[in-house]
Amino acid sequence: MASKPLIIFDPFPRNEEMVFTQDVELELNKISNLITYFGSRAPDKLIEENLSEVEIIVGQTSMPKERLDMATKLKAIINVKANWEANIDYFEAQRRGIYVLSAAPAMAPAVAEACIGYAVSLARGTIHNYNKFINNEEKYGIAGNVNAYTLFNAKVGFIGFGNLAKSLLKLLQPFNCEVSVYDPWLSDSYLETQGVKPNELNEVLSMNQFIFILAGVTSENEGFINKDKLDLIQNDSSVILVSRAEVLDFDYFVKLAKNNIFRAAADVFPEEPVPFDSPYRKATNILFTSHLAGGLYFSYKNIRDMMMDDIKQILKNYPPTRLQRAEPSQVQLRRDR
């Protein structure tokens, strides 16, 4: 009988509760010889003494060309943290036919759901009305909704059109929004096939009542939504930031929102965890959350389901179908953390 394939499970900073539940462990032990390591990245010695036999690595294990040369049976590297680190030779992996996969699609539905919540909360003035109620200053019915507006039939702008934007677009369908998109990595004709209107960044910022900032940060776009761009946003628009704080001038973004130029929600920050004495904690009219839009057990179950589906596909010498494949020319530009 042929021996079972070797899988190294090295998922840090993910832990057992997130990606190695009992059902996953049982299934992997059925179909593979399994080496696991939790609590930190697996030691170099553990990785290197098994490179000649490993067929799948689950984690963000460092895999430069020297290690890829040793891993002659390797079929896939599965990143369960949903970003791209610079510790893999992506071009060499692609040349060898090794799949490098990310669990990013698994996180998108939960973040998209949060985006809807942020948008409705901003438009309806939920924080403002809550504070009024606590201070015995509330007004009822239409009197308390003088400055409220609705997501229904609204003009909506997306900055970035990746996994998250596609999930969000589905959730927006019942609201009958007019959606325009800025994404320089995608062609106009492709965006049109997705049912959105391609547009330039200035127009997306200046013409929409709701703006969702969904772009990841790269070496080319860090800080591209600068002060001049932020000044284009319509007064009283709702701006939702859930991708990376580095894509914009975050301090100026906070300043404009704090001064009620526009309404804002942010789930990400330039430094995380945010220092206890950060001035951001004093901007009480901004809807801040602590990078938790995607952090649900629902998301981790999605990761496990997608991961297991693709592991089984790959071990049968079929292409993966659920996780996102690395595109080396784009990955090398990313500034994920």
Image (cartoon, grey):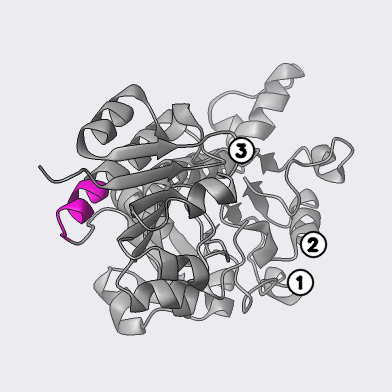
> Which residue corresponds to mark 1?
227
Q: Quadrant of residue 283?
A: top right
Q: Position of residue 36 (x, y in %)?
A: 44, 36
> Which residue corresponds to mark 2?
252
Q: Position of residue 39 (x, y in %)?
A: 59, 34
> Which residue corresponds to mark 3?
125
Q: Alpha-carbon neighbours of circle 1 within 10 Å: few (<14), some, or many (≥20)?
A: some
Q: How far apart are the two marked residues, 2 and 1, measured between alpha carbons?
A: 7 Å
- Residue 321 in view of the camera: yes
Q: Alpha-carbon neighbours of circle 3 within 10 Å: few (<14), some, or many (≥20)?
A: some
Q: Which residues are magenta?
A: 310-318
Kindly identify the residue that appears in the image at 74 percent across and 54 percent down.
Answer: 270
Q: Is 172 inside the magenta-drawn segment?
A: no
Amino acid residing under circle 3: Gly
- Residue 183 in view of the camera: no
Kindly identify the residue that appears in the image at 74 percent across and 41 percent down.
Answer: 273
Tags 2 and 1 touching, CB below 8 Å = yes
Q: Decide if residue 287 is on the left or right side of residue 183.
A: right
Q: Decide if residue 172 is on the left or right side of residue 13.
A: left
Q: Decide if residue 193 is on the left or right side of residue 240.
A: left
Q: Quadrant of the N terminus?
A: top left
Q: Alpha-carbon neighbours of circle 2 within 10 Å: few (<14), some, or many (≥20)?
A: some
